């Protein structure tokens, strides 16, 4: 019995010191969107959410991620009713924004953060993993996507954020 207690005490002690010695994730915090560039295979660059996109990404210490990206120049609905937009208004609202939340895992050595999507305005992302290659330079966070198809073109998006807190 004493041997078992000693093993438990050593185990608790080493796991506590291991957790204590781990540094916090560098992505934790709130980040304000400042640019989104879409690079296609032909080398062209487009701006998915306009030239002055807005949004945020938030990573917390518990492993949650929240993302909201949008084009602030989307037209308002003339009716003022979110459920009574014209086809064009609804299309512009959907195409000019994306929001999702979920969990994230960070592979700092590989420079990769994976968003495990639990809910999204784009239903196809729910239950999927979105891989982002990250780079932090001072107060700037760059997230580069793996190639994906949008608008019939294969693109890679580069999202650039500034730290809020």
Image (cartoon, grey):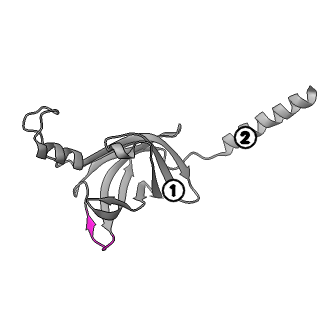
In the picture, residue 2 is in which quadrant? top right
How many circles with numbers are drawn on the protein? 2
Q: Residues within 10 Å of mark 1 (few under 14, many from 20)?
A: some
The answer to whether residue 42 is magenta is yes
**Residue 65 in sight:** no
Q: Position of residue 116 (x, y in %)?
A: 47, 44
At a point 31% along the width and 41% down the height, the residue shown is 121
Asked whether the residues under the numbered discs 2 and 1 touch, taking CB atoms below 8 Å apart as contact, a structural biologist would say no
Q: Residues within 10 Å of mark 2 (few under 14, many from 20)?
A: few
**In the image, which disc is placed on residue 17?**
2
At a point 37% along the width and 52% down the height, the residue shown is 162
Quarter of the rendering occupied by the C terminus: top left
Q: Position of residue 112 (x, y in %)?
A: 51, 56
At a point 20% along the width and 47% down the height, the residue shown is 72
Camera-side residue: 128 or 69?
A: 128
Camera-side residue: 70 or 129?
A: 129
**In the image, which disc is placed on residue 35?**
none
Residue carrying label 1: 112
Q: Is residue 157 above or below residue 103?
A: below
Label 2 secondary element: helix
Quarter of the rendering occupied by the N terminus: top right
The answer to whether residue 148 is magenta is no
Q: Indicate left or right for 149 with 74 as reference.
A: right
Q: Which residues are magenta?
A: 41-46
Q: Indicate left or right for 124 with 83 as reference.
A: right
Q: Position of residue 92 (x, y in %)?
A: 17, 48
At a point 31% along the width and 54% down the height, the residue shown is 34
Q: Residue furthest top?
A: 1
């Amino acid at each position: 019995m004493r041997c078992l207690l000693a093993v438990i005490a050593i185990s608790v002690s080493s796991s506590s010191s291991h957790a204590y010695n781990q540094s916090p994730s560098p992505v934790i915090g709130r980040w304000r969107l400042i640019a989104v560039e879409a690079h296609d295979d032909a080398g062209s660059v487009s701006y998915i959410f306009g030239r002055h996109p807005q949004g945020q990404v938030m990573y917390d210490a518990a492993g949650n991620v929240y993302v909201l990206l949008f084009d602030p120049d989307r037209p308002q609905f003339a009716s003022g009713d979110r459920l009574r937009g014209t086809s064009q208004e609804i299309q512009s609202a959907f195409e000019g924004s994306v929001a999702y939340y979920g969990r994230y895992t960070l592979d700092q050595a590989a420079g990769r953060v994976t968003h495990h999507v639990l809910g999204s305005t784009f239903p196809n992302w729910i239950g999927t993993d979105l891989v982002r290659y990250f780079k932090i330079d001072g107060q700037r966070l760059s997230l580069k996507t793996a190639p994906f198809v949008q608008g019939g073109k294969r693109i890679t998006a580069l999202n650039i954020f500034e730290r809020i807190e």
